[in-house]
Image (cartoon, grey):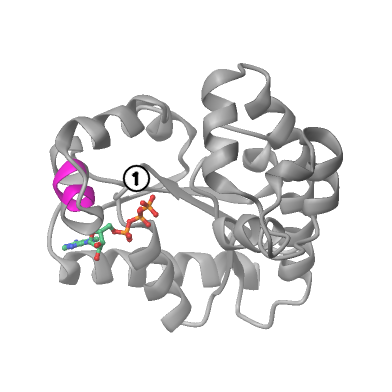
C-alpha cells in the first residue's frame, strides 16, 4: 500500500509550519484538525450524531457545534469527552483516509496533533514524524501567537503527551528549536527520504 507519514508534535512545536514546507515540496497534507472542524461546522456531517447523543442545544443557530457549551459539558461531565470522541474519531479517520485516497501529491502526510495521545494512527501510517522543540520555546511561541498567559499554555501542555512519549513513538524527529532556515534544511532531507520510500528505492 501507499507510503504515508503521520506528522505530530506538541502545541506550538511548529507542525503547521512544517506541513506547509512539505506541501511546498509536493507532498499532500491531510489536516485532521481541519477535518474535525468541518465535521462540526454548519450542518457538518457529525452534527446529527452529536445532536442525537447530547441534545439539540449543542447545535447553534447555524447547525454548527456550540463549542463553548460543549467545552463546559466536557469540563463538568467526565464521560462527555469520550462520548464526543467516539462520534468524531471514526469519522475523522474515514474522511482523512478518503482525502488521502484522492491525493495527487508524491506521498501523503497526515497532520495529527494528538497522534501519540489518541487512536490508532500509529498503526495506519508508514512512519511517524515528530516535530520537537524545547518546552520553553513552545510556551513562548504559543504565548506570542495566541496571547495566552504562561500558566494557560502549561495547562494545555499538561494534557498532551510529554516530549519523551512523543520521541518514543517517532520514527523521525525534526528539531524546531532554532531558525526557520534550519527547519527548511531538515524538511528537505526528510522529503528526499520519503520520496525514496514512496518510490520503493529504499524500504
Ligand atoms: P498547534 O499545535 O497549536 O496547532 P503547531 O505545532 O501547528 O501548533 P505552528 O503554528 O506551526 O505550531 O507554530 C507555532 C508558532 O510558532 C507560529 O506562530 C509559528 O509561526 C511560530 N514558529 C514555528 N516555528 C518557528 C521557528 N523555527 N522560528 C520562529 N517561529 C516559529
Using the rendered view, name the quadrant where residue 198 is placed.
Answer: bottom right
Q: Is residue 104 above or below residue 38?
A: below
- From the Cβ of disc 1, is ligand 1 less than 8 Å away? yes
Residue 1 visible in this rendered orientation of the protein? no
Left or right, residue 14 beside residue 121: left
Q: Is residue 37 above or below residue 115?
A: below
**In which quadrant will I find the C terminus?**
bottom right
Q: Nearer the viewer, residue 55 or 4?
A: 55
For the point 30% across and 28% down, the residue is 155
For the point 68% across and 83% down, the residue is 104
Ligand 1 lies in which image quarter?
A: bottom left
Principal secondary structure, stretch drawn in magenta:
helix
The answer to whether residue 86 is magenta is: no
Q: Which residues are magenta?
A: 139-143
Residue at the disc numbered 1: 11
Q: Nearer the viewer, residue 203 or 45?
A: 45
Q: Is residue 30 above or below residue 105?
A: above
For the point 34% across and 45% down, the residue is 11
The picture places residue 45, in percent across and down from the top left corner, at 80, 59
The picture places residue 99, in percent across and down from the top left corner, at 73, 69
Q: Nearer the viewer, residue 28 or 59?
A: 59
**In which quadrant will I find the N terminus?**
bottom right
The picture places residue 201, in percent across and down from the top left corner, at 60, 69
* Mark 1 Cα shell of 10 Å, populated few (<14), some (14-19), many (≥20): some
Residue 84 visible in this rendered orientation of the protein? yes
For the point 85% across and 51% down, the residue is 48
Amino acid at each position: 500500500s501507499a507510503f504515508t507519514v503521520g506528522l505530530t508534535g506538541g502545541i506550538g512545536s511548529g507542525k503547521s509550519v512544517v506541513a506547509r514546507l512539505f506541501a511546498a515540496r509536493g507532498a499532500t497534507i491531510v489536516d485532521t484538525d481541519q477535518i474535525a472542524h468541518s465535521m462540526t461546522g454548519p450542518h457538518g456531517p457529525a452534527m446529527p450524531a452529536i445532536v442525537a447523543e447530547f441534545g439539540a442545544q449543542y447545535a447553534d443557530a447555524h447547525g454548527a457545534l456550540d463549542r463553548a457549551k460543549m467545552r463546559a459539558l466536557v469540563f463538568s461531565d467526565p464521560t462527555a469527552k469520550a462520548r464526543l470522541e467516539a462520534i468524531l474519531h471514526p469519522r475523522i479517520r474515514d474522511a482523512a483516509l478518503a482525502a488521502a485516497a484522492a491525493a495527487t501529491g508524491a506521498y501523503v502526510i497526515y497532520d495529527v496533533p494528538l497522534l501519540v495521545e489518541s487512536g490508532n494512527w500509529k498503526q495506519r501510517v508508514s512512519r511517524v514524524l515528530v516535530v520537537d522543540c524545547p518546552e520553553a520555546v513552545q510556551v513562548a511561541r504559543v504565548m506570542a501567537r495566541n496571547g495566552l498567559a504562561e500558566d494557560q499554555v502549561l495547562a494545555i501542555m499538561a494534557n498532551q503527551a510529554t516530549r519523551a512519549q512523543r520521541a518514543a513513538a517517532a520514527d523521525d524527529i525534526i528539531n524546531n528549536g532554532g531558525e526557520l532556515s534550519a527547519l527548511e534544511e531538515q524538511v528537505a532531507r526528510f522529503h528526499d527520504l520519503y520520496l525514496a520510500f514512496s518510490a520503493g528505492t529504499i524500504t
